[in-house]
Amino acid sequence: MTEMTQEKIRAWVEIDTGAFIHNLKLAKRQTGKKVMAVIKGNAHGHGAVTCGLQLEANGADAFAVACFTEGVALRQGGIQAPILILGWTPTEFAPQLAAYNLTQSVIDEEYAVELNDAAELAGKAVDVHIKLDTGMSRTGIFAQEDPVSAAQAVYRIAKLPSIHVKGIFTHFAAADMPEKDDFTAWQLNNYKSVLRELEAMGFEQKVVLHTGNSASILYHKDTYFDMVRMGVMMYGLYPNGIFSAEGPLEQALTLKARVAQVKELPAGASVSYGCTYQTERPARIAVVTAGYADAYPRSMSNKGAYAVINGQRCPQVGRICMDMVMFDVTNADVRRGDEAILYGRGGMPMEEVAALAGSINCEPLCLLTNRVEKIYI
């Protein structure tokens, strides 16, 4: 039996911070640009403060988060680099944005005016990056084949006295899909068209330009500009969902759990809720201490998922429960207390998990609960 520590009683994740550093340096080498590390959603379940400190110490130039509270947590954790809030923040938080030195995304001109007024009322100034909607049709100033109106809005926003425009950016909708490269090129042209209009208007303010996400870093060299935003690839996940065992990325996280019981079942025995699986022969079934409340998706039930226990693949059987999951260990040497690798290094790649779960490779990791101990290597 594997040596058991207090942190490894039930279910845990092992996170190799060296993988972050490897992937960060890869992005820097490939692009030759500054890298903004996107660590929203608690760094996709990896632990934002711990990851952020490691990344900052190894050359990350800036960070991006989803919301104000995530930015505050990074500042309180000791992160000193610039932090961009990608989502909306209510304007009454303008004083706190300034106090924590957080950069706010401006998603339309009306919001820019409201944020400026709130900052001015508080006697503060807030740094901002302006978001352009070049084709995602989500947040941002509409810039889909209307570069003049978008540029005029940017120009007016830059004149507001209590917000300081530090960047202009956009986000690609399908940069990980080769069959939609024309759409990505169209988005990029929309972005460049706004920049050309701004130049024609005499806009001379120095700003950071950034469009590239993980897919762009890997597949679209023409999108780099001044800085790139490194999201899922930082954790060793491929934005197109295609796993490459040879690299170049290194996966950081591995989910592990314990075998709680090994039981002998006769042929025809039903396993787990709903009786969705029946043994076709006498079988040995291992009950493992993790479930969908531990980021092991229920939607993978009976679809070919497997655990690696003592170096042997053991197929998942029956419906995955909230706290437990069963594996057929008839042909494996498995005992109570043994370590089971559920996914990650030495187990199922996250891309395979995503395919079985009908999701994307980072979603299960974002669902990691606090009861899953994080162990940093």
Image (cartoon, rainbow, N blue to C red):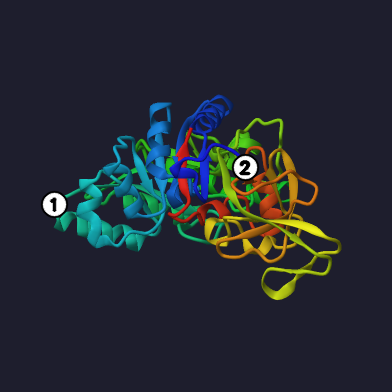
**In this picture, residue 31 sits left or right of residue 91:** right
Q: Residue at x 34, y 63 (%)?
A: 110
Q: Identify which residue is drawn at 30% across, 62% down.
A: 90
- Badge 2 marks a residue whose secondary structure is loop
Left or right of 167? Residue 310 is right
Secondary structure beneath disc 1?
Answer: loop
Check the image and report above or below for 269 versus 230: below
Snapshot quadrant of residue 345: top right
Instruction: Please state the horizontal and vertical placement of residue 299, each as a whole percent of the image.
Output: 66, 64
| Residue assigned mark 2 | 344
Question: In this figure, which residue is indicated by the disc labeled 1?
Answer: 123
Amino acid type of the residue that numbered disc 1 sits on in the rendered structure: Gly
Residue 253: quadrant of the picture: top right
Residue type at the position of mark 2: Gly
Query: Which of the two marks, 2 or 1, is nearer to us in this view?
Result: 2
Q: Position of residue 118 (x, y in %)?
A: 21, 59
Look at the image and tell me whether residue 277 can be seen. yes
Residue lying furthest bottom: 274
